[in-house]
Image (tube, rainbow, N blue to C red):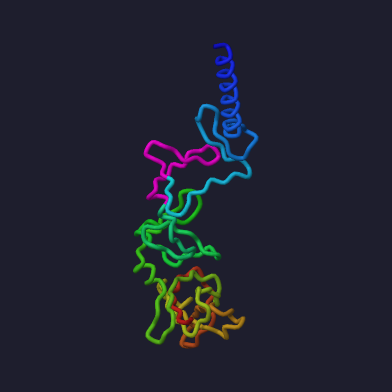
């Protein structure tokens, strides 16, 4: 009986040693991949790769969590999926907008009053697209047209129209005409410095006096002149 007990003890010792020899690499923390003692969590250290093979699925069940740097990722699967198939610079329905290399996006639809400009909360642009398009449009001759009002400061005022080049312009007094000024005209000049391209000259004129109808440069200013310019 003593011999048998000794044999059983030896065999038990050998079995325990074999179990430890197999189990220790799994729970030791000096290998790339290991399981916490007690089985609470797997660790993938440097040199360890966890691979989901083709056809395999990694499913985080409801109530579970996926973390990066210890922070739980809160977006749902549907919210993550809005990033799928996105082309930078191209807008797509129900997808995230990612700007292109030039900070560009091909289409952006904004509801009326939804566009805001300026610092802080910004100021809403309340005009509709149709109203904005009416500010500068295309004429039958393929030219652009823009209009404005100038308050005179001299007999000849240079006005920047916003056009690249002006090909024609008109001007009329909005203030009531008097002997000084009596009328207003508009000149496009040479569009190469006198005035610069895209600018016009608003001129006001007065009556010479008496029976002489000859016009000469006005001497009274702060008069309102409406103007229209055509160009490109």
Residue 45 occupies which quadrant of the picture?
top right
Q: Position of residue 179 (x, y in %)?
A: 46, 78
Mark yes or no: residue 183 visible: no
Residue 195 occupies which quadrant of the picture?
bottom right
- The verdict on residue 73 being magenta is yes
Seen at 50% across and 73% down, the residue is 162
Magenta range is: 59-80
Q: Residue furthest top?
A: 2
Q: Position of residue 113 (x, y in %)?
A: 36, 57
Residue nearest the viewer, comparing 134 with 228? 134
Q: Residue furthest right?
A: 30
174 on left or right of 187: left
Which secondary structure type mostly characterizes the magenta part of the structure? loop
Task: Classify 105 as above or below 116.
Answer: below
Seen at 40% across and 80% down, the residue is 138
Q: Position of residue 3 (x, y in %)?
A: 58, 14
Task: Classify 92 as above or below 182.
Answer: above
Residue nearest the viewer, comparing 119 with 17? 17
- The verdict on residue 117 being magenta is no
Q: Quadrant of the N terminus?
A: top right
Q: Position of residue 110 (x, y in %)?
A: 38, 60
């Amino acid at each position: 009986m003593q011999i048998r007990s000794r044999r059983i003890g030896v065999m038990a010792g050998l079995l325990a040693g074999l179990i430890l020899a197999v189990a220790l690499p799994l729970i030791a923390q000096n290998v790339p991949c290991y399981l916490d003692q007690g089985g609470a969590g797997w660790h993938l250290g440097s040199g360890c790769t966890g691979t989901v093979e083709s056809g395999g699925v990694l499913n985080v069940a409801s109530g579970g969590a996926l973390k990066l740097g210890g922070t739980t990722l809160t977006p749902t699967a549907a919210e993550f999926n809005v990033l799928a198939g996105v082309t930078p610079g191209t807008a797509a329905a129900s997808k995230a907008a990612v700007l292109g290399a030039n900070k560009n996006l091909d289409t952006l639809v904004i509801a009326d009053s939804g566009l805001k400009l300026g610092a802080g909360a910004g100021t809403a642009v309340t005009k509709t697209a149709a109203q904005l398009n009416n500010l500068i449009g295309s004429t039958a001759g393929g030219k652009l047209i823009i209009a404005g009002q100038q308050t005179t400061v001299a007999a000849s005022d240079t006005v920047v129209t916003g056009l690249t080049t002006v090909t024609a312009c008109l001007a009329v007094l909005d203030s009531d005409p008097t002997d000084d000024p009596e009328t207003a005209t508009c000149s496009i000049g040479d569009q190469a410095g006198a005035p610069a391209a895209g600018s016009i000259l608003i001129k006001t004129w007065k009556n010479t006096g008496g029976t002489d109808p000859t016009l000469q440069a006005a001497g009274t200013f702060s008069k309102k002149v409406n103007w229209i310019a055509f160009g490109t």
